Every structure is written in structure tokens, then in C-alpha cells.
Amino acid sequence: MADDFNAEQRRYLEGFAAGIGAARMTGGLALGPGAPAAPAEPTGPDAPHIKAQDATVKAGGKLCEQEKWKRAESPFEGHNRLIAEAATGKAPKPEDNFRWRYHGMFWVAPNQVSYMCRLRIPNGILHHWQFAGVADLADAHGGGYVHVTTRANLQVREIAPEHAQPFLDGLTDIGLTARGAGADNIRNVTGSSTAGIDAQELLDTRPLAKSWHTWILNDRTLYGLPRKFNVAFDGGGVMPTLEETNDIGFQAVEVLDGAAVAPGVWMRLVLGGISGHRDLARDTGIVVRPGDCNAVADAIIRVFIENGDRTNRNKARMKYVLDAWGFDKYLAAVEDKLGRRLDRVAPEHVAPRRATDRFAHVGVHAQAQPGLNWVGVVLPVGKMTSDQVRALAAIARECGDGQIRLTVWQNFIMSGVPDARVAEVESRVEALGLTTKAAGIRSGLVACTGSRGCKFAAADTKGHALVIAEHVERTVRDLDVPVNVHLTGCHHSCAQHYIGDIGLIGAKVVVSEEGDTVEGYDIVVGGGFAENPKIGTEIWKAVKAEDCPGRVEALLRAYLARRESPAESFQHFTARAGAEALRDAAEAQPALKAAA
């Protein structure tokens, strides 16, 4: 019978059926003779979201497709149907692709005709046996490799539909989960990668990250937000957590005598970070006791649930509520939720953040515990084969404390390595084709999935990143300091290109009068984070991918020729000289002049 309808008629019927389901879900239709009266208002765990949807429609708004899908069938209540359909090898419909993401599964066709699974790893810390277990699952159900993400997380690709639930079951067997790792939910909780082992830190973020992770998992009302949401905890240590790129950032700070609160370590609240939309989180002036972070984050999110945009996905992040309302109005609504006023401290009563080390995630570093070290391993563009993962897990078990600490830089560190075992760790890592050396360009190379595995990407970021690295290593042999180069495929900016020393965002470059295009990038420079947060400045648009290695080379040569000393970082140089001056100096390089 379905074949008797044309495409437009089928779309109408599908929409009509979804509307019937939504109306029944909210008591808008009687379910038959004798059915109980509709409730006065929605009830159950989805009630806050349904009320927000109703308010949007009442105000004249039109719900976006994702809001309609959530309303027609809860991704959790429809899970058994999703499993049954996937077991047949069937690709999901768009609305079911969205629902699967509540369980951590992303259908990434047409780039890869399979699922990608993104995990939840609070504070990015795993045991060696969990790390090896993910590799085993990647072999049994995926493509035999693992990626580290920029949220200190892991993802596995090339999971066939019939392997989706077995993969998730396997995660449960090793004490991990992917629940809520995608779609309109709170993403993996990040914290300081060196938490508990960093002599500089003010506070160990592990208990805070794990507590918030548990809070999320056990409260259904915190799923189905207007859009995805990021929360991070920074302990004030030597390794940045990039909390300024999150919707909510909690920064450990030292409050000094003379403030309106007791002196000591508090968590400063920053809000509204979303680097892909050219905004970093801003200081609210509020400080929170560490034990109150969950309640405060919960209230912030509930204000977002009620007031976030459910009509336009491009404007559905918390930043846009803050832009429309201002911080004072938003924070007043949060305090109303909490039933109390939050503590505020003037900037002069907060000690400055201690200096961070941009490359503490690579190489050997002494821990707070005498005689022990953490060792950071370079993973260019974050990829490891399953065999490498298992071998690295064995090194962590045999030479360290058995923990793998993922970082927001798409790599990881092994902790608890005694002085006497450091050389062995370095040697065994090198034997796997990897390195622990913080030099040149590879240690600061970050790239999103790109067009090989993401339909949104305009360029093959991982492939181009490696080409750039190889070119620079061959042509700029005097590069004596690490430089961060970030490549992201689209405006979602998963690789956070705006905070890199050099950032590239995918773009289609028109190369003929007929409108033919090739892969390319817009290029920005001078981004920063931690004690020097800054959105980078765009200096070139629509550069063909094949020309990008030469552009990066020219930027690096201009920097090396004009820096005041080897101690002047690329970011400091760009801030001093100016992005436009750096661009002009790069264009004066012989290689670019010849190309022009």
C-alpha cells in the first residue's frame, strides 16, 4: 500500500502519524471510549521538555525536526525497537539515527556506512584493562582501530548495524557506558588529565567529574536538551582542560583574604563557551564550593531546558540565551531555581591562575609523588590500531600505575611510572611507531574526523593534517618548539580550530566558472586558552587543501625569523606582531610569492 503514495504524500502521512503520537504522549487525544481524562499538564521524566516545546508552539514557534522526533517517541522507550531493526542489518531512518545517539551510536553514512560509537569516560581516566577491552570490542564489532577525541574520550568506528547493541553490551562488561554521549544531551565530562598527580593543582577534579557523571546518568530529565551541552572541571594544574570552550566551566581558584567569602580553594563559574561560534566562556564573578558544583550546574541546565531555542538548531546552544538575556538575567533565573543567592568575589580577591604548560600532555613530567612520573604519548590526529592500544595498555600495567589518562589534545598519558622505568616506557612506545617527544608539529596536531567519516565535513582533515606534518618536518627543520595546528571539517569545530596557534576550518573552494569545487580551508592564527584565552583571527579564506602545507610552512618561517627569542611562543608572537603582520610576512616568503 505504501508504494501507492508519492513521496510528498508519504511525508504528509509520516508527519500526521508523528503528530498523533505526540498528541497522545501529552494527553492531547483520547485513546478510545472510556479513556481517562487527559492530565492537566505533562508528567514523567520528559515533562520539562514537553512543557518547553508547548511554550514554543504557543508563542508561535515551529519545532525543529529533532524536537518532533523526541516528542513522538522517547529514544529510551524506543530502544528495544531500535535493537530489533538494527539486528536485521537495516540502516536507521533519520529520526532513528537521532534516537540511537542517545545510546552513543552515530550512523555516519554516506561517509562510512556504519555506526560510530562515542563513549563516556568521566575525567578521561580508564584502567588498563578497560583500554584493552575497548580495543577488543573494536576488533569484534568495529574497524579495528580507536580514536581519542577532543573531549578526552574514545570513539570506535565501522560498527555494522547488527553489531550496535553487542558493542554497547560489551562496554557494560568492562564497566563503561555510552549513554547520552550524543544528540541533545550532556556530553562526556572533562577534568584535569593530571588530577591527583600534579604538584601545581589546587584541587583534584576526579571526584567532581565522576560525581557529575553519575548525576547525569541517573536523572532522565537531563536528557533531551535544546542542543548538546558541555561541562568541564579544571583543577588549576599545569595541564589545561580547555574549560573555557565549554557551556559550563568550573575553574579551581584561590580566593584571598578580604573577599566576601572565606579564603581558600573555590570553583570559579564561567559560562557560554562554544569556540565554533567564536565565543569562549566568560567569568560570571561567581564562586562555588566544590561540593555545590552539581546543584549549580543542574540549575543552569534547567534554565536552559526551559528557555533554549527549540526551533533553530543553529541557535540552540546556551550561548544564545546568554546573548539575548545577558548574564545577570540568566544568573537570576539560576538563583531562583536554587532558592538562594550565589557567592560573588571581585577579581582582585582571586589569585591569578598559575602558568600552564602547553605541552604537558607530551613527554616525561615529574609527579607530585616523589620518584614517579607521567609520560605523554603523541598520537598524530588521535588514531591507534587495536594492537597498539593493547600494547600500550600492557606498558601502563607493567611500568606504571595501570591508568590511561586521555587528554583534550587527542592523546593520552600514562601515570605512576617510576624513574627507573621511564626509559623502558619511551623505548616500548617508540617500538610501536609512536613517540613521547614534545617537538615540532606532530605533538600539537589536532584534527576532527573529517570527510572520511563525517557528512558535515568539507575536507579530509585527518589526511590533510598528516600531509601538513610531513611537509613541515621536511621543510622547516629549525622548528625548535611545539606549535598547535588544529584542523576541523565544519562549523561545529570539533577540533577547536579557533584556539590553535594555526587553525584550519574546512571549506569548498571554487576552481572554475562552472562552479566546480575542491577541498580546502579558511585559516586563522593566534588562538589561545588557559591563562591566555583568545579566539584566533582569520587571515586567509578558501585556500585549496594542496596549498595548505605551503601556507603553514610560510607562517612558521615568518614566526621563526621574527620572534624575539626561542622562548617567545607562536601565540605570544602573534599577539605582539598582529595577525595581519604575520600574514604579510608569510606572503613575503619565497615559496608563497612564487605560488602567487
Image (cartoon, rainbow, N blue to C red):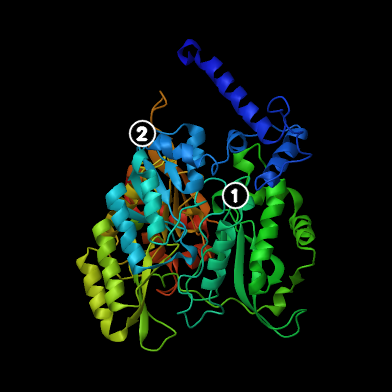
Q: Amino acid at mark 2?
A: Thr
Residue closest to the far left: 431
Which residue bears the numbered disc 1?
A: 223
Image-based side of 220 in relation to 583, left or right: right
Residue 410: image location, x then y, percent? 40, 60
- From this viewpoint, is residue 246 visible? no
Q: Amino acid at mark 1?
A: Tyr
Label 1 vs label 2, nearer the camera? 2
What SS does tag 2 mark? loop
Residue 242: image location, x then y, percent? 52, 63
What SS does tag 1 mark? loop
Q: Quadrant of the C terminus?
A: top left
Q: How many marks?
A: 2
Nearer to the camera, 170 or 497: 170
- The residue shown at (59%, 38%) is 70
- Label 2: how many residues lie within 10 Å, few (<14), some (14-19) or many (20+)? few
Residue 330: image location, x then y, percent? 75, 55
The disc placed on residue 88 is 2
Vertical side of 374 occupied by 550: above or below: above
- From this viewpoint, is residue 453 visible? yes
Vertical side of 114 occupied by 185: above or below: below
- Label 1: how many residues lie within 10 Å, few (<14), some (14-19) or many (20+)? many
